[in-house]
Structures are given as structure tokens and as C-alpha cells.
Amino acid sequence: MRATYAKTAVLALLAVLGANCGNGGYNSENVTVTVSPATATVPENGQQPLQATVNHFCSGCVPQIEWSVAENNGLGCTWADPNTPPLGPCPGGTIQGQGPQGILSENVIYFAPSTAGTFHISASQLITFTEVVGGTSVLTVSP
């Protein structure tokens, strides 16, 4: 029962946000997400700050970015809070959100794994109920 109320509240909030964005006069087809840096080399067990920028989004809408590492195969590898890393396994590394939006922040820190490789870190923004726009940074982890 409680889950139903929570789900209803989230859907209502999304409807309000969607309505507000619709009134912002933006065209969802023009929205883009870029991740900086687009490429970088990080040492094993190193860190790399990343920033997502949402362009041409509605005026007054606050981006809420969902971050992921493709090589983690959908595993939850974002930090639930700033002091507790995910339990893993996270073969592609982990993401720690920064600022008051936590893991939905535009600014994150990527924590590289202890193994070398190429990893794809994506930032996605929900722009309508059915459209998601994203950008990717390709990071090379070296020994």
C-alpha cells in the first residue's frame, strides 16, 4: 500500500515537472547532453571529475542526471551517500555524485577500477515521459 502511494506521488511530481517544462517553450528534439571531459586517461584506482551539461532544456528545469558505467552491466555502482561506496562488484568503476543532488548531480567523481581498460561513463536526462537524452565520456584506465 505504501509503495503505491509513493509511486503515485513520484508520478504526480513528474507530471508537474513535465508540465512546467512544457511551458518553458523548448523543443525536446533540440535537447543535448554532453559529458566533460569527453575522453581522459585515469590511473588504476584513480579519480576523474566529470560534468554533464544539458543544453536547450526548459528554462527553470533543474537537470537530474542518471549516471552509469556501461561495463558494469546495469549493476548499481553509484554511491548511495558520499561516505559509503557501493558493495559491487563494479568492474568498470564507480560514480559518486557531488552537491545537494547527490547521484543525480551534473557533477560527479568517477573512481577507476584496479584493472586497466576502456570504460564508457554515460549521463542521461529524462526530458519527457518517453524520451531520454544522453552523453558519454570514454575513459582509459592505465596501470
Image: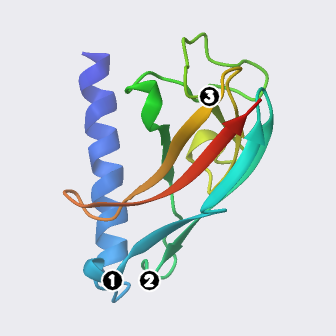
Image quarter hosting the C terminus = top right
Judging depth in this view, the residue of 138 and 83 nearest the camera is: 138
Image quarter hosting the N terminus = top left
Q: Which residue is mark 3?
A: 93
Identify the amino acid type marked 1.
Asn
Q: CA distance from mark 1 to mark 3?
A: 31 Å
Judging depth in this view, the residue of 141 and 132 nearest the camera is: 141
Structural crowding at the residue carrying mark 2, measured as other residues with C-alpha within 10 Å and reported as few (<14), some (14–19) or many (≥20): some
Which residue is drawn at the image coordinates 36% and 74% (left, top)? 21
Mark 1 or mark 3: which comes first in sequence? 1
Classify mark 3: helix, strand or loop. Answer: loop
Residue 57, image x, y percentages: 43, 77
Question: Furthest-front residue in view?
Answer: 143
Q: Nearer the viewer, mark 2 or mark 3?
A: 3
Classify mark 1: helix, strand or loop. Answer: helix
Which residue is drawn at the image coordinates 63% and 58% (left, top)? 39
Structural crowding at the residue carrying mark 3, measured as other residues with C-alpha within 10 Å and reported as few (<14), some (14–19) or many (≥20): many
Q: Nearer the viewer, mark 1 or mark 3?
A: 3
Identify the amino acid type marked 3.
Gly
Q: CA distance from mark 2 to mark 3?
A: 30 Å
Q: Which residue is mark 2?
A: 56
Up/down of 131 relative to 91, above or below: below
Whether label 1 touches label 2, CB < 8 Å:
yes
Residue 14 seen in the current view = yes
Judging depth in this view, the residue of 108 and 118 nearest the camera is: 118
Q: Which residue is mark 1?
A: 30
